[in-house]
């Protein structure tokens, strides 16, 4: 009897392993869409990224609108920018960007919350460091409420992004970053204040997309082909375009509330463990050169997403201005609607 039990266990474990490997191969393989349909292209823009590269961020933004003819933008409301002094809001920087976009019939996805895109992820104002978790959470809810109350007057905001990769353990935060319970409260506040769709985002490669997507109308995901860390060094993701198609199908089958999964962050800039401003041009191109940029865009077209936001346009502008290399910028122009 014991032999039968051991044999049964061995067969079961072996079967699970074989099926797991087969599933992984099936899941990560597949070239995706052979003939992509019409895609809506946009860009993510973060003023501090431009400033860190030594640029006047307002010039970069206007060039995105006027020269690249961007009609879809993903912008953020960084807490440390709009409330440098506790209790004193200054939304003028974001107001200006939204108004300039509106003049040109450009639409905005506006990200609100504590953990937003770009390092250090949690854009905490300095004064928050004297507070503990419970107080930080309450102030986060108030900040979300006040942000939406202020910006909901703009008709060209087409959706609210609540937090950025809220469940993904990446970034630096005072106390803990937003958890699922806090995220749910933030979403409820936004829904009470405005009827426009609510989105959030998740890591395209390292998250299931299931947990936080159960509370939003649309889910944005990132797509990274190459990353780097101090332990493993440079890492190339083995996924093929079909990987994202299959994950999207699974998410929408399980979470019926998700109307759409889209690509909110397509990596088209170098990845490094040091700030980009400290990298040589050769090091930057070793991570993301023009050939890899072209290949990544072609790859993204085959994922099946019909809405894609480019990540790295601040670097493209820097290359054009500082190194007279306009290949990346001009490539972006070819993607935008005529």
Image (cartoon, rainbow, N blue to C red):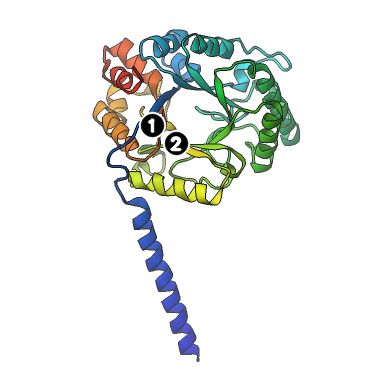
| Residue 42 seen in render | yes
Give the residue furthest to the left.
291
Is 183 placed above or below 102 here?
A: below
Mark seen at residue 32: none
Is 169 placed above or below 88 here?
A: below
Give the residue furthest to the bottom.
1
| Residue 239 seen in render | no
Q: In the rendered view, does 208 fall on the left or right side of 138?
A: left
Q: Which residue is mark 2?
A: 222
Image coordinates of residue 80 in percent, x first then y, are 61, 20
Image quadrant containing the C terminus: top left
Q: Residue at x 50, y 92 (%)?
A: 1
Q: Nearer the viewer, residue 23 or 158?
A: 158
Image coordinates of residue 124 in percent, x first then y, are 62, 25
Q: In the rendered view, does 181 fall on the left or right side of 34?
A: right
Circle 1 packing at 10 Å, graded few (<14), some (14-19), many (20+), is many
Q: Nearer the viewer, residue 79 or 197?
A: 197
Q: CA distance from mark 2 to mark 1?
A: 8 Å
Image coordinates of residue 310 in percent, x first then y, are 40, 27
Query: Based on the displayed image, in which of its 4 quarters is residue 88 positioned?
Result: top right
* Mark 2 and mark 1 residues within 8 Å of each other at the beta carbon: yes
N-term mark: 2 or 1:
2
Q: Residue at x 58, y 17 (%)?
A: 155
Q: Which residue is mark 1?
A: 267
Image coordinates of residue 48 in percent, x first then y, are 50, 17
Circle 2 packing at 10 Å, graded few (<14), some (14-19), many (20+), is many
Label 1: element kind: strand
Label 2: element kind: strand
Q: In the rendered view, does 324 fall on the left or right side of 103?
A: left
Query: Based on the displayed image, in which of its 4 quarters is residue 204 positioned?
Result: top left
């Amino acid at each position: 009897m014991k032999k039968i039990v051991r044999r049964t266990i061995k067969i079961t474990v072996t079967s699970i392993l074989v099926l797991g490997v087969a599933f992984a191969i099936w899941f990560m393989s597949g070239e995706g869409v052979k003939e992509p349909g019409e895609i809506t292209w946009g860009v993510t823009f973060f003023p501090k990224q431009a400033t860190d590269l030594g640029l006047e961020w307002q010039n970069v933004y206007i060039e995105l609108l006027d020269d690249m003819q961007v009609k879809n933008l993903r912008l953020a409301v960084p807490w440390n920018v709009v409330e440098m002094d506790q209790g004193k809001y200054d939304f003028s920087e974001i107001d200006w960007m939204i108004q300039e976009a509106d003049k040109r019939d450009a639409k905005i996805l506006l990200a609100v919350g504590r953990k937003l895109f770009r390092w250090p992820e949690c854009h905490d104002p300095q004064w928050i460091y004297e507070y503990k978790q419970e107080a930080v959470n309450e102030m986060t809810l108030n900040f979300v409420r006040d942000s939406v109350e202020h910006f909901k007057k703009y008709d060209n905001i087409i959706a609210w992004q609540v937090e950025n990769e809220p469940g993904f353990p990446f970034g630096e935060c005072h106390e803990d970053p937003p958890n699922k319970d806090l995220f749910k409260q933030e979403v409820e506040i936004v829904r009470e204040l405005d009827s426009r769709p609510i989105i959030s985002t998740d890591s395209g490669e390292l998250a299931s997309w299931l947990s936080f997507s159960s509370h939003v109308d649309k889910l944005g995901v990132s797509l990274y082909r190459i990353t780097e860390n101090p332990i493993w060094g440079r890492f190339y993701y083995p996924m093929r375009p079909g990987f994202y198609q299959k994950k999207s199908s699974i998410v929408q089958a399980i979470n019926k509330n998700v109307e759409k999964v889209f690509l909110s962050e397509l990596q088209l800039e170098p990845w490094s463990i040091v700030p980009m401003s400290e990298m040589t041009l050769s090091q930057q191109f070793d991570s993301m050169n023009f050939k890899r940029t072209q290949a990544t865009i072609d790859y993204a077209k085959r994922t099946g997403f019909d809405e894609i936001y480019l990540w790295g346009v601040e670097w493209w502008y820097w290359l054009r201005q500082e190194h007279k290399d306009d290949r990346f910028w001009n490539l972006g122009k070819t993607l935008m609607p005529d």
